[in-house]
Amino acid sequence: MTKKDYSTPGPSRGRGAKTLDRQDRAILNLIQRNFPLTHRPFLALARKTGMKEKEVLSRVQRLKDLGIIRRIGASFSAGAVGFSSTLCAARVPAEKIEEFVAVVNSYPGVTHNYEREGEYNIWFTLIAPSPEKIGEILKEISRKTGIRKVLNLPATKTFKIAVDFNFDS
């Protein structure tokens, strides 16, 4: 069971979900997979939802502030663009978790970082140009934090590609 998501700062997961109205839900449905690639993407969203551009921008900012939107950006297959990715698990004493997480999150290739129950209590994903670079980064993390038990668990097969949420209900 996940205890805490250290991937992005902000409110905890699920907070604010009851504040979603029909227009918020329409925006969320549109931006999950089909964010407009245009000079004025929020104007394009406004036209699709019947709102003004400024209102769409305001709503997206509010949804981000609430922690409902974590980020807006492209998702790439690491392997398809010549990068390597891995899942990592670390055994971190409770008193060192915040420090460890801060160091891990300082690396641009870290996409997710979670505290979990169990012996290996911090799990994160890491993307880098090569498996060798991943190894170097993990050694740096260990050196900087003093945490020696960091497992490198590279994926051998993809089981989940994406999840879309239907906000129409």
Image (tube, rainbow, N blue to C red):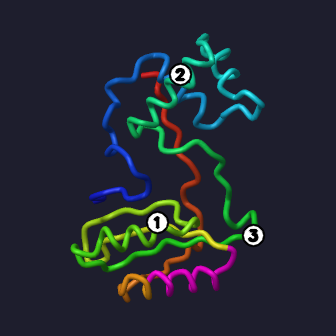
**Label 1, label 2: how many angstroms apart (C-alpha)?**
32 Å
- Which one is closest to the eye, mark 1 or mark 3? 1
- The residue identified by callout 2 is 26
> Position of 110 compared to 89: left or right?
right
Magenta region includes residue 138: yes
Amino acid identity at mark 1: Asn
113 above or below 95? above
Determine crowd level at label 3: few under 14, some 14-19, many 20+ residues with C-alpha closer than 10 A.
few
Whether pointer 2 and pointer 3 mark residues with C-beta atoms closer than 8 Å, the reply is no
List the residue tagged with mark 3: 82
Residue at disc 2, secondary structure: helix
The label number, if any, that marks residue 70 in the structure image: none
Q: Residues within 10 Å of mark 2 (few under 14, many from 20)?
A: some
Which numbered dot is residue 105?
Answer: 1
Q: Is residue 32 left or right of residue 34?
A: left
Amino acid type, callout 2: Ala
Distance from the alpha carbon under mark 1 to that under mark 3: 22 Å
Give the structural element (helix, strand or loop) at label 3.
loop
Residues 151 and 45: in front is 45
**Amino acid identity at mark 3:** Gly
Where residue 18 appears, as percent x and y from the top left, is 31, 26
Residue at 60% across / 15% down in the picture?
49
Residue under the image location 27 percent in, 58 percent down: 3
Q: Magenta part of the protein: which range? A: 129-141
Q: Is residue 115 left or right of residue 70?
A: left
Which one is earlier in the sequence, the residue at label 1 or at label 3?
A: 3
Quadrant where the C terminus lies? top left
**Residue 101 placement (x, y as % from top left):** 38, 68
Is residue 52 shown in magenta?
Answer: no
